[in-house]
Image (tube, grey):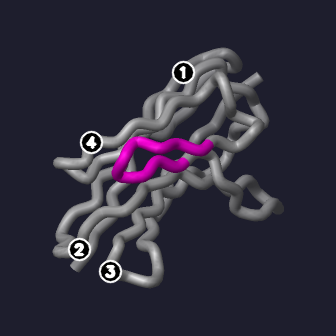
């Protein structure tokens, strides 16, 4: 059974940094991509950043130049380095894992990131 485990969220001041981690375990499938999404209260879930097995990345415009996504293919672990955090980055951050043989992605439970002004 696939298990998605996120960690690294917390409270940080405006301009600070956090590093999120997500481990996908228990899968017999081939990893295609992993990504981070976020959802703030009253808003839709939005893409923060994604990375595929070949290292190709995609970022939401609102985090470009501030966040960096990276992938450890062997460990099926994705990281999100978040720098120059702003209060508007406050949200629950969710990890998503996509496998080649599975039509639907797997999601983690989410980790709270709060940026105080």
The CA span between labels 3 and 1 is 35 Å
Where's residue 80, x and y in %? 47, 36
For disc 1, the neighbor class at 10 Å (few under 14, some 14 to 19, many from 20) is some
- Quadrant where the image shows the C terminus: top right
Q: Are marks 3 and 1 in contact (CB under 8 Å)?
A: no
- Residue 54 is left or right of residue 86, and the answer is left
Precedes in sequence: disc 2 or disc 3: 2
The CA span between labels 4 and 1 is 21 Å
Which structural element holds mark 2?
A: loop
Q: Nearer the viewer, mark 4 or mark 1?
A: 4
Precedes in sequence: disc 3 or disc 1: 1
Precedes in sequence: disc 3 or disc 4: 4
- Residue 32 is left or right of residue 46, and the answer is left
Please state the extent of the stretch shown in magenta in the rendering. Answer: 50-58
Q: Which mark is residue 17?
A: 1
Which structural element holds mark 3?
A: loop
Precedes in sequence: disc 2 or disc 4: 2
Question: Which residue is label 4 attached to?
Answer: 72
Question: Which residue is label 2 attached to?
Answer: 29
The CA span between labels 3 and 4 is 20 Å
The CA span between labels 1 and 2 is 33 Å
Question: Which residue is label 3 attached to?
Answer: 101
């Amino acid at each position: 059974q696939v298990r998605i485990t996120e960690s690294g969220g917390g409270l940080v001041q405006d301009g600070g940094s956090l590093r999120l981690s997500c481990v996908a375990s228990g899968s017999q499938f081939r990893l295609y991509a992993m990504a981070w999404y976020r959802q703030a209260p009253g808003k839709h879930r939005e893409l923060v950043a994604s990375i595929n097995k070949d290292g190709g990345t995609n970022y939401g415009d609102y985090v470009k130049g501030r966040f960096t996504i990276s992938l450890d293919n062997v460990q099926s672990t994705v990281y999100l380095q978040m720098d120059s955090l702003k209060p508007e980055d406050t949200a629950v951050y969710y990890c998503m894992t996509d496998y080649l043989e599975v039509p639907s992605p797997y999601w983690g439970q989410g980790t709270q990131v709060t940026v105080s002004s």
